[in-house]
Image (tube, grey):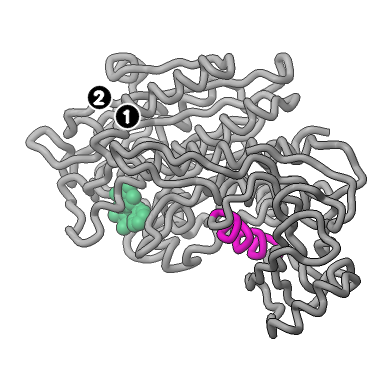
Amino acid sequence: MEFSLIDTTIQQFDGDCVVVFSNSEVANDDSNIQQLIELNHFESKSGTTLLLNLVAGFKAKQVIVVGMDKAPNTAKNYTKALSAVSGVLDSLKSKSVMIQALDVDGFDESWVHRTGARVLQNATYEIQKLGADKVDRVLENIAFQSDNDNAHELAQGHAIADGMALTRHLGDLPSNICTPSYLAQTAQELADEFNLECEVLEEADMSTLGMGSLLSVSKGSIEAPKLISLSYQGNGNAKPIVLVGKGVTFDSGGISLKPGVGMDEMKYDMCGAASVLGTMRAIAQIQPAINLTIVVPAVENMPAHNASKPGDVVTSMSGQTIEILNTDAEGRLILCDALTYVEKFNPEVVIDTATLTGAVIVALGKHHCGLMANDQDLADDILAAGKTSLDTAWQLPLDDEYDELLKSNFADMGNIGGREACTVTAACFLARYAKDYRWAHLDIAGTAWVSGAKKGATGRPVPLLTQYILNQIN
Ligand code: BES
Ligand code: MN
Ligand code: ZN
C-alpha cells in the first residue's frame, strides 16, 4: 500500500472514496453531507461510520463519514476512527482513498501523517494461516489531505508498521517453526535485505564466553541456543543505542513446569526478540543518522533429564553466581548474560524488552508496558516516546529494598525474589548486570499480545522504541 499527500478539496478528489470526519469544520460545511448525516440519524461518536454513495457534489463515488467525539480531537479518537475506517475500506474494495485533514489536539500535522500511515498500514496485517495463500489487497493508495508536500512522515509511519508486521508475524508463529534458529535466520535475512551486520553465536561460542546462566536455560531443549546481534550504522563511529530482546521461543517453565491451561501462549515468550527485530526493520528502512545494535538471546525452555533443576547454581558471564530457585524465571537468566555481552558495543544506552513477568499484567493490565530504569533521564525519554507513539509505558520503582529480596545462601543471588513485587525484583536482578551503562527495562508481558477471540501479537513496543530512537537525532 502507498501513502501520499494531496492538496485538493474533498469534493474534487477523483479517486474511489473519501473519508470525512464528522465533527470537523469541512464536513459540517458540506451541506449535502450534513443533510445525509441528519437523514440517517448518524450518531457522531468516536469509532462509528456511515457509508454514503454518490453524494451530490463529490467526484468520488463513495464517502465514509467517520464519527468523532466532540472537538478537540484526541489522539486516541483519531486512531480509533482510522481503525474503524480501515474495516469499512476492506469491505468496499476501493483502490484509492483520500482522508480529510484533521487537527489532533496536542500534535502537529507531521504526527497526524506518521501516525495515520502507521495505523492504517498496521490494520492490513493478517495472520497467515499455515499453508494458506496470501490474500491480494485491493487498496493501492491512501492520500492524506494536506497543502504540504513532505511525504517523509508517511514513509516513517509505513516503516514502523512494516516493523510491527514482522514482530507480529514472528510472535504469531508456533514454536515448532519459530525456533532460536529461525530467529537467527530472520536476522540474517534482514541483514541481507538492508545491508546490516549480523553475527550469530553458537552454543560453543557462548560456552567459551562463560555464559553459564544463558546456557542453563537452553540445555534441556533439543533446540540449539543462538545469540544474535544485528547492527545498523547510520552515524559513523558514534556509540550505538543497544536493544536487547528476550527470545524464549517456548516457555514451558522447565522443571518448574507451568500449568497446562493457556500454555500455548508461551510461544509469545519471544516477543521481546521479535520487537527488537521489528524495530531494526523499521530503522533500517527509515535510515536515520544513528547507530543501532540489537541483541537477541534465543533459547527454548523445556523440562528434560538434562534440564536445570531448582537449587542448581550457575555462573554467569559477569562472574556472579546464581541459585536457580525456579526454572520458570528463565528470562532473566538469559538476559543477564546478554546484558554483560553488550558491553563490547560500548553502548550509549541499553534498553531491554521482555515478556518477563505475569505480575506486570496484574499491575498494569494490557495498556502500559512496565518500565524500570537505572537512569531517570532515560526513563523520562522513554515515557515521552510512549506518549508520542501512543505505545505507552508506566514506570515502576527500583529501590534497593527490593533488590535485597534476591538474597541467596548458596550463591550471589537467587533468580526469584518471592511473591511480592515480582516485576520489580525481576528488574532488580537485571540491574545487577547493567551497572556499567544507562539502562532501561520494558516488561511487555501484558502489551505484546492479546488473548481471547482476537488472540495474536500486537507489534508493541515497536512504535515506542522506534520513536525513542528517532527522538535521539538532534
Ligand atoms: N514468560 C514468563 C512471564 C509471563 C507469564 C509472560 C505470563 C506472559 C504471561 C516468565 O518466564 C515467567 O514464567 N515468569 C514467572 C516468574 C516467577 C517464576 C518468579 C512469572 O511471572 O510467574
Ligand atoms: Mn518462565
Ligand atoms: Zn518466560
Image: magenta residue range? 78-90
- Of residues 298 and 171, the one nearer the viewer is 171
Q: Is residue 344 left or right of residue 421?
A: right
Side (left or right) of 25 relative to 217: right
> Which residue appears at 17% of the width and 28% of the height?
222
Instruction: Please say if 452 is above or below 302.
Output: below
Residue drawn at point x = 32 percent, y = 60 percent: 418
Residue 420's spot in the image, x, y percent? 38, 66
**Res. 300 visible in picture:** yes
User: Separation of disc 2 and disc 1 at Cα?
Assistant: 7 Å
Q: Which circle marks residue 109 in the picture? A: none
Q: Is residue 153 left or right of residue 184?
A: right
Residue receiving disc 2: 224
Q: Dot 1, crowdedness within 10 Å: few (<14), some or many (≥20)? A: many
Q: Residue at x 46, y 25 (%)?
A: 341
Q: Position of residue 438 (x, y in %)?
A: 63, 38
Whole-percent x, y for residue 424 in the image: 46, 57
- Asked if the residues shown at circle 2 and circle 1 are in contact, with their CB atoms under 8 angstroms apart, the answer is yes
Q: Earlier in the sequence, mark 2 or mark 1?
A: 1
Q: Quadrant of residue 368?
A: bottom right
The image's mark for residue 180 is 1
Secondary structure of the residue carrying numbered label 1: helix
Q: Say if 124 sits above or below 248 in the image.
A: below
Location of residue 290 in the rendering, given as x and y in whole percent from the top left corner: 71, 26
